[in-house]
Amino acid sequence: MIFNPKAYRAVPVGIVIRRQPGVTRWQKWNWTVSGVLLGTGPAKWRELRREGDVIEYHAETLQLELHGADSEAYQHNLHSQVPSLYVVMRDGAGEAPYDMLLVTASPYEAQDYTDSGEEIVEKVAMPSAMLAMIQSFVAEHYEEEEFIKRKRDKKRIDLVQDGIGDPRIGKAADIYASPGLKRRRVN
């Protein structure tokens, strides 16, 4: 596929993470993606709001990339009950509890990240401004493919087969013998 710059759009999206006390003694904190901010600048775990033990952070700003080739996936997302963005993250290697990897509007791409089990994929409702932007992108680039039923080939299946098995085997008694092995005589 040739890269078409007209069928590509990138938008900065801030990821908002909420930390609240865990509900069991084995989990001290519960971390969830609580929202996204459209068009934000760079940030690294900047505190946005605090209410008692609950804290919301602007964890990071990632680029939401829209590709014309993925417009079918975006179309599927827009027709879901709650159109969403998917945030892909991994347990943090440094001071941060999580490393943000990706934000996507494609449910197919998000599902691919769930296969390994190493990444955490959180679904968050899409803000109305982002919903409008993705709807216009899909309207511009989505082309529904016409379903074409596969036709059978013209191979004849009523022909009679000459012999049984592999034609390299010389006699009927050796049908189950491997054709490449030569047997040694044991005295």
Image (cartoon, rainbow, N blue to C red):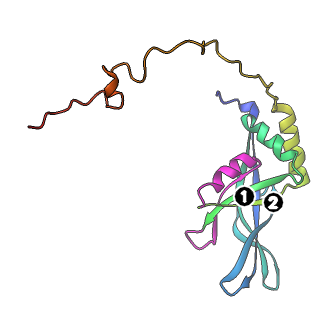
Residue lying at the far left of the rendered structure: 187
For the N terminus, the image quarter is top right
Residue 109 % position (x, y): 69, 47
Q: Nearer the viewer, residue 91 or 155?
A: 155
Q: Residue at x 12, y 37 (%)?
A: 186
Numbered tag placed on residue 124 in the rendering: 2
Q: Which region shows up in magenta?
A: 92-117
**In the structure shown, which secondary structural element does the residue marked by tag 1 occupy?**
strand
Q: Quadrant of residue 26?
A: bottom right
- Tell me which amino acid carries mark 1: Val
Q: Residue furthest front?
A: 173
Residue at screen point 36% across, 27% down: 175
Distance from Cα at disc 2 to Cα at disc 1: 8 Å
Characterize the local packing of mark 1: few (<14), some (14-19) or many (20 or more) Cα atoms within 10 angstroms.
Answer: many
Q: Which mark is residue 87?
A: 1
Q: What's the residue type where badge 2 is placed?
A: Val
Q: Position of residue 174 (x, y in %)?
A: 31, 27
